[in-house]
Image (spheres, rainbow, N blue to C red):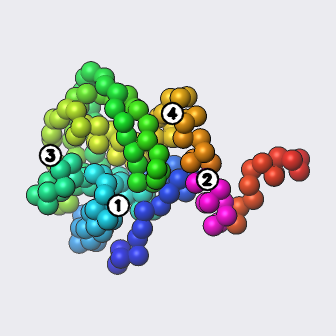
Amino acid sequence: MYEDLKIILWPDPRLKKVSRDVTCFDDSLKSLTDRMFELMREHRGVGLAAPQVGINLRLFVMNPSGLPEDDRVYVNPLLSEAEGEEEAEEGCLSLPNISANIWRAKTMVMDALDLHGQKFRQEADGYLTRIWQHEFDHLNGTLLVQRMGPVAKLANRKIIKELEEKYAAEHGIEPKARKKRKS
Ligand SMILES: [Zn+2]
């Protein structure tokens, strides 16, 4: 039922929404995450949040190593106990060809549910914590575009503009600049 899902790109409005909690832990939730893992691998990503496939539910999948046994699903995740700060480069499957240095907490505690609705708690640091925070941001409608500093914004300006123009052309939206001239 989810075969047709694909990764949606900036500035699709579904990426900017605050997603809602998952309340139903049935087979369709498993099918959804199976398809998300498939898309994540196809695009060589390490994480993918449901809003990135156009579904505004609070869940994400990730695999930091690429090994099948490291597939992880986090449903209704909550992050707490942030400690330390570090800056590193990040990319996003919804923002192709864009990368930016982003500050994130170094260590965090994750409380989430698994596919059966069972609670679990993990603590991690470094790369894992960075993926958690990136994917968690997606569930609140926050993307790298909003997180990056002025230098990264400037460096990526052209690519962001191209994505926005492509989206406008595909959805029959008049470019912003032309609208302004009219008024
Ligand atoms: Zn992303």
> Of tags 3 and 4, which is closer to the observer?
4
Q: Amino acid at mark 3?
A: Phe
Residue depicted at x 58% and y 34%: 154
Cα gap from disc 4 to disc 1, whole angstroms: 23 Å
Q: Is residue 167 magenta?
A: yes
Q: Which mark is residue 77?
A: none
Question: Whole-Å distance between the Cαs marked 3 and 4?
Answer: 36 Å
- Calculate the distance from the C-alpha at mark 2 to the C-alpha at mark 4: 16 Å
Disc 3 designates what residue? 120
90 relative position to 114: left or right:
right
Image coords of residue 165 (percent x, y):
65, 56
Q: CA distance from mark 3 to mark 2?
A: 41 Å
Observer-side mark, 3 or 2, equals 2
Residue 68 versus residue 145 in the image, above or below: below
User: Where 136 sits versus 169, above or below?
Assistant: above
Q: Position of residue 38 (x, y in %)?
A: 28, 67
Q: Please, what is the three-letter code of the amino acid marked with disc 4?
A: Ala
Quarter of the figure with the N terminus: bottom left
Q: Above or below — where is 156 with respect to 47?
A: above
Residue under label 1 = 43
Disc marking residue 152? 4
